[in-house]
Image: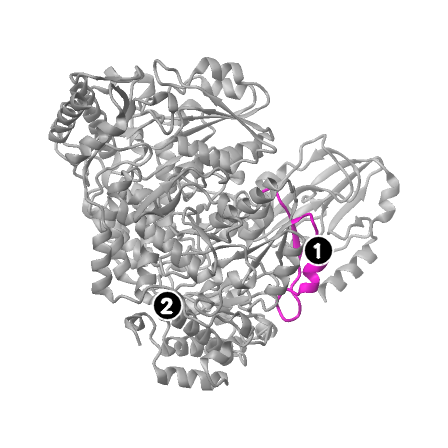
C-alpha cells in the first residue's frame, strides 16, 4: 500500500507501521573477531527466537518520523510557556554544547578518581554553589528529580530522629502543597496531617502550633507557596516546629523567586530540595531528565546519601565511608549530564545575574497580575512572587470554564498555564512567566487573555469548541482510561 | 549589565514602564512581604560570571582524558548513532514540558507510546510505563509494588544483583516493616544458588528478585523460578543492567516474570558519569493500576482521529496524592526518546547483531586472556559481554600500571564483594576493537609480571 | 437530580436500600454528577468486613478518585461485576444498574443514623453553597 508523504500535516504512523523487511538504519564497527555461535555458548532455551514486532527502518525513515513528531510539539523555544511552579525559562544553548563534550559524555561512572578530577570538582563546586544560594551546609546531587529529592530529604529527617530514639509518626503538609509532598510522606511511612492556609493564602503560626507536637517529625512547606505568595510567617513557624524537636522541609520548586533575595536556611529551613530543571535552566526534556539535589543544615549532613564528594588537599574524592548515611537513592552519583548544565548556568549568571533573574521573574509575574486582574478573578489580591493564580469566576456566568480558557489559548498559539492546581483555589489558572520573557512577550499574552475574556462574554462557543486550529481536538481521555491501549498491538 | 543579560531581556525602559503599571517605585518594593532582617547584606558568594567563550574554555579544561576502557558493571560503552543526538537536539523535544496538554504534545506522546511498545517487546511483557529514574530505583519500585500487591513483607534478593541496586532497594524499603533476605551466588557457576532460593521460598515471601545477566555478567536460568515463586503466591521480579543482552537473550516475560525492571542506558544514552540514565519498568496488564510512573494511551479525538494522551493518571501523585503508587513526577522523558530512536535505527536485525558482536568480542577477550599467565576466569556460567577473572596480584596495583598505558583494564570487585578481593570484572563491547583487546591482554600480562 | 424516596443516604454520598438482613449500596446521582465520566471501579473481595465509615473501594474518573465509604457495619456478600466492563452504569443509572455492593447488615440500629431522601437533599443544597 502506498503511503502518502505525511510531511507537516501531522498524520504520522507509528514506527511499527512503517518500513519493512530488509530496511536497515544502522551501522556497527567492523567484525574484526570471529562471530560466535550463540547456541554453543548459551543454553538454547535461554536465547530468544526473534525480536517480534521490532521496526525495520532506514535512517531517513527514522529521521523523517521523529522530525515530524517534533513538529507537533511546543517547547520553550517555540513560545511562552507560563506553567506555574515549573519555571519554564530559556535553556541556554551553550549548556547543551558543554554536556555533549566527549570528556564528559563518555565518562564511565567507575572511571578511576584520578582521571575524573575535573568532573568531581564540578560536582563539588555545584554543591557549594547550591549550599550558598539556599543558606545550607551540605548538599547531595544524587536525586534524579524534585520528588526524588523530597523522598531523600524526608528519609534523612526520619533517620536523624530514629538515631535519637525518637519514632515520630506524622508530617504536617499545607493544603497548597504539590501532590508529591503528600505521596512522599506516605512512602516514607508518615501519616500526613493537612494544615489549612489562612485568608491571606499563607500558613499561620497559630494553626501550626495547634498541630505541632512531639509526634510530628516535620512540616513540609513550599516557599514561595503554590499561590505565588511568600510564606511570611515561615521563620516563626520554624521556631514552633524546632521547639518541639521537629524539622522544617522546604520544597524548593519555587526557588526562582528568591535567589540572592533571601536564603531559606536563614528562615529556619533544615532541608530543601532544588529542581535544577526549573530554577537552574536545564531543559525539561518532555518529562525529564531533571535533577533534584537536596541541601541540608549540618545536623542532617551525616545522613546524606553515599557517596559524598569531598576535597582533601586539593584532590577531589568520592567518599562512601559515611556510617549514618540513609544509603543510596539511585546507582552512581546523580544526573551528571544535568548537573553540568546547571553548573554552567550558575557560572554564566554569577551572583548579580541570579539575583537579577529572581527580581525580573517577580517583576514579570506582578506585571501579569496587575494587567489581568480586571479581566480575571484574582482570589488573593496581594503582591505575588514569581507566579500568580487566577480563577474562572468572572467567566462562570457565561458557562465558560478554566479548561475552556486554556484550550482557547492554544488557538492563539500559546501553551496554557497550569490549570486546576493548587487545589485550594477552585478552577485555578496558575501562571509563572519567568524572567526570560520580554515585556512584548508578556504584553502579547496579556492582550490575548483579554481578548479571550471578551470572547467568553460575546461568543462563548469559541472557547467551548476550542482548540479548533490543531490537528487533534479534545481527545477522549475517558475512553483512554476505560479501555486502556498502552502499546501497539499489531504484532499480536 | 553583565554578560548574563543575554538571557534576561529587560531594558531600563521596560522596567520603568512595568513598575509604573504595577504601581510601585522600585523593583525592591516587590519584595515587601519579606522581612528586612532576613534580607542578606552581601551578595551571594559565587564566582563572577563568565561569558560564553570563557565558560567553554573553563569547562574544556575540566574534561577527562579518554582511555581505552574495559569498564561495565551497570554502565556500558556502546555506539550511539549520529541520528540519536541529532534528533533529540530538536528543541521541540528537549525544551518541552510533560505532555499535559495533549493537543500540542502529540510528538512527545506518540514517541512515549512507541517507547512503551518497544519495552514490552524487548522484555516480553504486556505493559510498560514511560520511564523511571534508573535501573536501580526502577528495581526498588518493583519491590515496593510487589509488597503492595501481595501484602507480604519479605523479599528474596540474589546476591548477584548489582551491589548498588541492592543498596538502593535497602534504602527504599522500610526496615521496620519489611525484610530483605540475600540469596548467595554459586562459587562455581556464578549464578544465583537455586537450592538456597527454593529453601527460602515460602508463603511469607512477597517477591524473588534476580538480575539477568547478573552483576558478574553471568546469564541466569530463570526457567522454573517463576513457577516455584508463583506456587507460594509470590511475584518474580527480573532485573537487568545491560539491555543490549536482550538482543539475543530470551526476555524475562518468557519465564513468567511478573515485573521486569532494569537499566536502559545501553540504548543510545551516553555514559555521562552515571546519569541521566533510564529506568525501564514493565509488567502484566492485571497489575497496571498498581504500577508507578507515567502512562500514555491511545485514544481518538472528536473526529475519530487517532491520538495519544496521558492516562490512568489517578495512580499518580498529582491526583492520588498521599495514596499514589509512587511520588514520581519528572522522569527520564528525553532518555526514553533516545532509546526509542536508537531502537528505531537498529531495529530487529541491528539489536541482534550488536548483541552478537558484544558476545563475540567478549569471547575473544576470554580466549586472549586465557593465554596470560597469572589470571583465570572465575565462573563457569555462560556470560554475555562481561566476565570475572581472578589475577595473581593486587588488582589496584595492576590496574594502576595498566593506566600508565592509557588502558582502564577492568573493575576491581573487592569493594563490592570482599571475598572477591583478587578479582576484576572485565567488560567488552562492540566499541573495543580486536587491536584494543590484544593490547589489553598484552599489557595485562606485562603488568602481572611486574607486580 | 434524583433522590429516590425509598432509599437512605450518607453524608459521603452513598445510598443504601434496606432489603431486610441485607442492603444494596451505591453512589448517589449527585456523587456521579460531581465525578463525571467514571472510568474504573475498584471492588472489595466478597467476604470482607467493613466498619461504618471505612473505605470499601474506589471509583475513578479521569481526573479524580473517590472512596466508597461503607454506610453501615457488615460483610460484603456480592459486588457488581458488570461495572468492570461498564463503569459508566454508575453515571447512567446510579440507583439501578450502577449498584456497587451488597452487604449483610450487622446492626439494623445503624440505619437510623443515615439520612432520608429529604434530609440528604437539604445536605446537598448546603454543600453547593
Q: Nearer the viewer, residue C69 or B199?
A: B199
Q: Secondary structure at mark 2?
A: helix
Left or right: residue A85 compared with residue A89 = right
Residue picked out by circle 1: A211
Q: Which residue is mark 2?
A: A351
Segment colored magenta: A188-216
Mark 2: few, some, or many residues within 10 Å (few <14, many ≥20)?
Answer: many
> Label 1: how many residues lie within 10 Å, few (<14), some (14-19) or many (20+)?
some
Q: Is residue B89 above or below residue B35?
A: above
Q: Nearer the viewer, residue B434 or A492?
A: B434
Question: SS for tag 1?
Answer: helix
Report the residue at 21% width, 30% height from top: B353
Q: In the image, is residue A345 above or below residue B392?
A: below
Let me know if residue B399 is in the magenta part. Answer: no
Q: CA distance from mark 1 to mark 2?
A: 39 Å
For this rendering, which residue is in front, A130 or B284?
Answer: A130
Q: Position of residue C42 (x, y in %)?
A: 62, 40
Q: Which of marks 2 and 1 precedes in the sequence?
A: 1
Please, which chain is the residue tagged with disc 2 on?
A: A
Name of the residue lying farthest toward the front: A313
Can the viewer see residue A472 in this picture? no
The image quadrant that residue A186 belongs to is top right
Q: Is residue B71 left or right of residue A434?
A: left
Residue B20, position as x, y percentages in the image = 46, 86
Instruction: State the image coordinates of residue A411 (x, y, percent, origin top left).
Output: 41, 68
Amino acid at each position: 500500500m502506498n503511503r502518502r508523504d505525511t510531511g507537516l500535516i501531522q498524520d504520522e504512523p507509528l514506527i511499527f507501521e512503517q518500513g519493512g523487511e530488509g530496511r536497515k538504519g544502522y551501522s556497527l564497527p567492523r567484525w574484526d573477531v570471529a562471530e560466535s555461535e550463540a547456541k554453543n555458548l548459551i543454553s538454547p532455551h535461554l536465547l530468544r527466537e526473534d525480536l517480534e514486532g521490532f521496526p525495520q527502518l532506514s535512517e531517513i525513515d527514522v529521521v523523517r518520523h521523529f522530525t515530524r513528531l517534533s513538529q507537533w510539539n511546543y517547547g520553550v523555544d517555540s513560545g511562552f510557556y507560563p506553567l506555574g511552579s515549573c519555571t519554564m525559562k530559556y535553556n541556554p544553548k551553550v549548556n547543551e554544547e558543554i554536556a555533549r563534550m566527549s570528556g564528559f559524555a563518555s565518562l564511565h561512572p567507575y572511571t578511576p578518581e584520578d582521571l575524573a578530577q575535573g568532573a568531581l570538582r564540578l560536582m563539588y563546586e555545584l554543591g557549594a554553589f547550591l549550599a550558598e544560594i539556599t543558606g545550607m551546609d551540605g548538599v547531595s546531587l544524587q536525586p534524579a528529580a524534585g520528588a526524588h529529592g523530597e523522598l531523600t530529604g524526608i528519609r534523612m529527617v526520619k533517620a536523624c530522629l530514629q538515631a535519637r530514639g525518637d519514632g515520630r509518626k506524622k508530617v504536617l503538609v499545607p493544603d497548597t502543597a504539590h501532590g508529591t509532598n503528600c505521596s512522599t510522606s506516605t512512602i516514607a511511612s508518615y501519616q500526613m496531617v493537612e494544615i489549612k492556609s489562612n485568608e491571606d493564602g499563607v500558613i499561620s503560626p497559630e494553626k501550626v502550633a495547634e498541630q505541632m507536637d512531639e509526634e510530628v517529625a516535620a512540616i513540609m512547606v513550599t516557599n514561595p507557596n503554590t499561590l505565588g505568595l511568600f510564606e511570611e510567617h515561615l521563620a516563626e513557624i520554624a521556631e514552633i516546629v524546632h521547639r518541639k524537636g521537629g524539622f522544617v522541609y522546604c520544597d524548593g520548586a519555587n526557588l526562582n523567586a528568591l535567589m540572592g533575595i533571601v536564603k531559606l536556611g536563614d528562615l529556619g529551613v533544615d532541608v530543601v530540595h532544588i529542581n535544577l530543571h526549573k530554577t537552574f535552566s536545564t531543559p525539561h526534556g518532555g518529562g525529564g531528565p531533571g535533577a533534584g539535589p537536596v541541601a541540608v543544615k549540618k545536623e542532617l549532613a551525616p545522613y546524606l546519601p553515599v557517596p559524598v564528594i569531598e576535597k582533601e588537599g586539593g584532590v577531589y574524592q568520592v567518599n562512601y565511608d559515611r556510617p549514618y548515611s540513609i544509603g543510596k537513592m539511585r546507582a552512581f552519583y546523580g544526573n551528571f549530564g544535568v548537573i553540568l548544565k546547571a553548573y554552567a548556568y550558575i557560572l554564566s549568571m554569577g551572583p548579580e545575574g541570579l539575583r537579577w533573574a529572581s527580581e525580573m521573574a517577580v517583576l514579570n509575574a506582578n506585571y501579569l497580575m496587575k494587567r489581568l486582574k480586571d479581566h480575571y478573578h484574582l482570589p488573593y489580591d496581594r503582591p505575588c512572587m514569581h507566579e500568580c493564580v487566577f480563577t474562572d469566576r468572572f467567566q462562570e456566568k457565561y458557562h465558560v470554564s478554566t479548561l475552556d480558557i486554556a484550550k482557547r489559548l492554544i488557538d492563539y498559539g500559546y501553551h496554557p498555564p497550569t490549570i486546576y492546581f493548587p487545589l485550594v483555589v477552585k478552577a485555578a489558572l496558575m501562571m509563572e512567566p519567568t524572567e526570560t520573557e520580554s515585556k512584548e512577550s508578556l504584553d502579547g499574552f496579556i492582550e490575548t487573555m483579554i481578548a479571550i475574556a471578551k470572547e467568553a462574554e460575546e461568543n462563548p462557543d469559541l472557547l467551548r469548541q476550542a482548540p479548533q486550529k490543531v490537528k487533534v481536538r479534545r481527545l477522549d481521555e475517558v475512553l483512554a482510561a476505560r479501555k486502556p491501549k498502552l502499546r501497539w498491538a499489531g504484532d499480536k | 549589565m553583565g554578560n548574563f543579560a543575554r538571557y534576561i531581556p529587560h531594558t531600563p525602559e521596560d522596567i520603568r514602564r512595568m513598575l509604573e503599571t504595577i504601581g510601585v517605585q522600585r523593583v525592591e518594593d516587590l519584595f515587601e512581604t519579606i522581612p528586612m532582617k532576613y534580607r542578606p547584606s552581601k551578595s551571594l558568594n559565587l564566582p563572577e560570571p563568565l561569558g560564553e567563550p570563557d565558560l567553554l574554555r573553563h569547562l574544556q579544561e575540566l574534561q577527562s582524558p579518554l582511555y581505552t576502557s574495559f569498564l561495565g558493571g551497570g554502565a556500558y560503552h556502546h555506539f550511539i548513532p549520529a541520528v540519536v543526538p541529532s534528533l533529540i537536539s530538536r528543541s521541540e523535544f528537549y525544551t518541552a514540558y510533560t505532555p499535559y496538554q495533549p493537543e500540542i504534545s502529540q510528538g512527545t506522546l506518540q514517541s512515549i507510546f512507541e517507547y512503551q511498545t518497544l519495552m514490552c517487546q524487548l522484555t516480553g511483557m504486556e505493559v510498560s510505563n514511560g520511564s523511571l529514574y534508573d535501573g536501580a530505583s526502577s528495581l526498588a519500585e518493583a519491590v515496593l509494588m510487589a509488597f503492595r500487591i501481595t501484602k507480604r513483607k519479605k523479599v528474596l534478593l540474589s546476591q548477584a544483583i548489582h551491589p548498588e541496586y541492592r543498596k538502593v532497594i535497602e534504602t527504599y524499603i522500610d526496615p521496620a516493616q519489611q525484610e530483605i533476605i540475600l540469596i548467595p551466588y554459586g562459587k562455581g557457576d556464578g549464578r544465583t544458588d537455586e537450592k538456597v532460593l527454593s529453601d527460602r521460598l515460602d508463603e511469607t515471601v512477597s517477591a524473588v528478585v534476580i538480575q539477568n545477566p547478573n552483576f558478574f555478567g553471568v546469564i541466569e536460568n530463570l526457567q522454573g523460578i517463576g513457577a516455584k515463586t508463583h506456587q507460594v503466591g509470590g511475584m518474580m521480579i527480573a532485573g537487568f543492567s545491560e539491555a543490549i543482552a536482550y538482543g539475543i537473550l530470551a526476555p524475562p516475560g518468557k519465564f513468567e516474570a511478573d515485573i521486569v525492571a532494569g537499566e536502559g542506558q545501553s540504548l543510545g544514552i551516553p555514559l555521562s558519569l552515571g546519569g541521566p540514565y533510564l529506568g525501564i519498568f514493565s509488567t502484566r496488564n492485571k497489575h497496571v493500576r498498581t504500577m508507578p510512573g507515567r502512562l500514555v494511551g491511545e485514544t481518538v479525538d472528536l473526529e475519530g482521529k487517532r491520538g495519544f494522551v496521558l492516562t490512568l493518571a489517578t495512580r499518580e501523585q498529582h491526583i492520588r496524592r498521599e495514596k499514589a503508587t509512587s511520588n514520581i513526577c519528572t522522569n527520564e522523558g528525553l532518555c526514553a526518546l533516545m532509546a526509542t530512536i536508537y531502537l528505531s535505527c537498529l531495529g530487529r536485525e541491528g539489536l541482534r547483531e550488536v548483541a552478537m558482536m558484544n558476545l563475540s568480542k567478549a569471547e575473544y577477550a576470554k580466549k586472549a586472556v586465557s593465554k596470560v599467565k597469572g589470571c583465570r576466569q572465575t565462573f563457569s556460567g555462560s556470560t554475555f559481554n562481561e566476565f570475572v577473572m581472578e589475577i595473581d596480584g593486587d588488582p589496584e596495583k595492576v590496574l594502576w600500571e595498566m593506566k600508565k598505558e592509557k588502558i582502564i583494564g577492568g573493575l576491581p570487585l573487592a569493594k563490592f564483594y570482599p571475598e572477591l578481593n583478587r578479582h576484576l570484572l572485565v567488560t567488552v563491547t562492540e566499541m573495543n576493537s580486536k587491536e584494543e583487546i590484544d593490547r589489553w591482554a598484552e599489557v595485562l600480562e606485562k603488568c602481572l609480571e611486574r607486580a | 437530580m434524583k433522590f429516590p424516596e425509598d432509599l437512605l443516604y450518607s453524608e459521603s454520598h452513598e445510598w443504601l436500600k434496606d432489603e431486610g438482613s441485607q442492603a444494596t449500596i451505591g453512589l448517589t446521582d449527585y456523587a456521579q454528577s460531581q465525578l463525571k465520566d467514571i472510568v474504573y471501579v475498584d471492588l472489595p473481595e466478597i467476604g470482607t468486613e467493613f466498619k461504618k465509615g471505612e473505605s470499601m473501594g474506589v471509583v475513578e474518573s479521569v481526573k479524580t478518585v473517590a472512596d466508597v465509604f461503607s454506610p453501615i457495619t457488615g460483610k460484603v456478600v456480592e459486588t457488581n461485576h458488570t461495572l468492570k466492563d461498564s463503569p459508566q452504569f454508575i453515571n447512567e443509572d446510579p440507583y439501578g444498574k450502577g449498584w456497587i455492593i451488597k452487604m449483610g447488615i450487622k446492626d439494623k440500629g445503624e440505619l437510623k443514623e443515615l439520612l432520608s431522601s429529604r434530609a440528604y437533599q437539604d445536605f446537598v443544597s448546603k454543600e453547593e453553597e
